[in-house]
Each structure stands twice: as C-alpha cells, then as structure tokens.
Amino acid sequence: MPFWSVRSAPVVNVTPVRMPERVGRVAVKVGRVVHVEVFDPALRVLPRAEYELHPHANSPGHVVDRIARGVDEAIAQARVERARILGVGVSIPGQVRPDGTASVFASNWEWNEVPLQALLAERIPDLSVILHNPLRASTVAELWFGAARGRDNVAVLTLGTGVGAGLALQGALYPGARNTAGEWGHTNLVIDGRKCRRGCVGCVETYVGAPCIMQHLAETDPDSPLLHPDDQAATINALAAAHAAGDPVARRVIATTGQYLGIAIADLINLFNPQIIVLTGWVADSLGSAVLPHVRATAARCALTEPWEGTEISLCPIDPRPGGFLS
C-alpha cells in the first residue's frame, strides 16, 4: 500500500510546521515540468520546488537530476529533517514495471526499460521512493479527493500530449498482469488512420492528443493565427479562448475532437460499465468545458443504453499540481 493515507484530514496551505517522526510526504509529478511538494502530517502543503524540462533534455540522467534537486530544495524550504520524511511518490509518464523500471514512450524521451528506481536510489539514498505512472496516480487522487470519491468503478482519462486511462474496478486500481493496463490511447479508433509515435495506426491518441488537435487545426485552417507550431500549450490555450469568443474554426476543431473522444469513451463504457469517467490532464484543463458537450452527445449515441445511463462524464475538479487535491 502507498505510504500516504486516505484518513488524513482535509487541508489548506499553511506555514511550515515541525513534524513528528517519519510522517512527512513528498510528491513529485514529472511531465513538461518537474513539480515537487512536501506535506505535513495533516497533508497540508508546505513549500514546493519546480524545474522545467526542455523538449530535448529528457535523458534519464537529466530527469533524475531534476527530481533529486527538486526533492532536496522542497525539503530544505519546508525546514523538515530528512529523517522525518516517510517517502517520495513519483508520477512518471510511461509504463512503470513492478520492479521500478520505467519504459517511457513519450515525444522526445526515447526511454526503454530505464531502471528509474535504482537511479533515484543513487541520488537520494536516504529516502524511500515509490513510482507510479500518471494514469494510476491521477486515479488514486480522484478516488480519494476528486469527482470519483465514493465510487467503486471508475475510469480517469488523462488528456495531454498523449492520452491514457487509469482504471479502478470494484474499488481497487486495476494494474493489469504487467502493470501496463490503461493504454487506451493506443486502442484503434480509425482504420487506416493517422500513425502514432509507436508506429500503430488510427489510435485514439492520434485524434485527441495535443499534437493531433494541432494537426487538425492546421488542416482546417493552415493560416490560423491560433496555431503555434512549436508550442502545444499556446495553441491549445488559444483554441480554448477562440472557442469561447465564438470563432468558427475553433468551434469546428473542438467539435470534431469531442466526437472522436466520445466514440472512444463509448468503448470504455461498453467494456467496463464505470459509474463515472473523469477527464483530467492539461488539455482537459484548457478545453474540457468546451469539448464536454460533444463528448457526452457522441458517447450517448455510441454506447449501449444500459451502461450509458449509469455513467457520469465529468471534468477533474482537482488542481493539476502534484498535491493540488489537497489545496
């Protein structure tokens, strides 16, 4: 069982406090940025550290260095003795094996069977480290503190550069036989469709991931001022703002994205019969309210009636920072 407890009291940001023996927790989220936060016994957020990861500087050594620096800095700023830290939880994109190795299949990373647990143990040997991928880390957060609280059968869909699903069945995380369950982004959506970065064709990810939303925007209007070819976040944010302002191109792109996403979600509804599906991730943070009506309408049309009527589709209410569910 992870070192954090669901029985901790609700929390707010407070001034750092002195902690009893081995009750501090450190949360690390690795993505475009390495976020690190420290929590006290009541899971109140103490000072945090943040290091940017550049697109072409994601070697294992570089990422481990940023994680270790962030952990050291956050603990020092929190004025916590390291001996009182119970452990470090690291959310890392990709497939994390039970032995702590990580196979990260993400743009510009090119990791394969990286022994991340061992590398982190060399840099921070005095602290216990637990690895999870963001899909299951997000699912735990939703089950304990978010939209899925009180539900037993849940799918948490992370929408970003890539996409994936965290699954909870009968109240427990479903890891699969090799801890790789949830690669929903690589299930087939369109026969003879776009090729994904893994070499598969027609994957969900190639129609609802950020690079592919940008591609659809470029195909719809090659001269669109909303398009920032080298900046995914800027493009997605511009698309959201333009949609809110009634821009017809933005509305067309978001409607199409929502339809593809709704079809893919209908498959999950038919397969797993979840009580709730939660959309999270930075793309969902930006486009969620705009895309959600199209998702719901399409899923209702494509899913079987009985499981659809028992399923809620919701946006994640949790702050996207690593410990944001506690803020």
Image: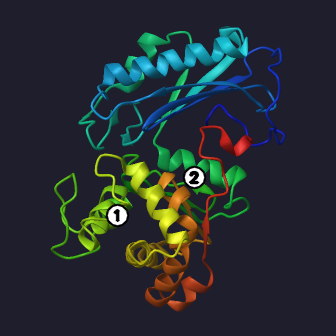
| Quadrant housing residue 117 | top left
Question: Is the residue 298 above or below the residue 176 in the image?
Answer: below
Residue type pointed to by label 1: Ile
Query: Which label's residue is closer to the chain start, 1 or 2?
Result: 2
Q: Position of residue 53 (x, y in %)?
A: 39, 30
Residue at point 51%, 48% (across, down): 136
Query: Which corner quadrant of the image does residue 150 belong to?
Result: bottom right
Disc 2: which residue: 139
**Residue at the disc numbered 1:** 213
Against 145, residue 294 (above or below) is below
Residue 85 image offset from top left, x and y in percent: 67, 17
Residue 74 seen in the current view: yes
Where is residue 122? Give x, y as percent.
42, 11
**Who's the residue at 25% across and 38% down the image?**
108
Q: Viewer-proximal residue, 14 or 263?
A: 14
Whether residues under marks 1 and 2 lie with C-beta atoms below 8 angstroms apart, the answer is no
Q: Is residue 157 visible?
A: no
Number of the front mark, 1 or 2: 1
Q: Is residue 196 left or right of residue 250?
A: left
Q: Position of residue 195 (x, y in %)?
A: 18, 62
Disc 1 on helix, strand or loop? helix
Would residue 291 be found to the left or right of residue 19 on screen? left
For this rendering, which residue is in front, 216 or 135?
Answer: 216
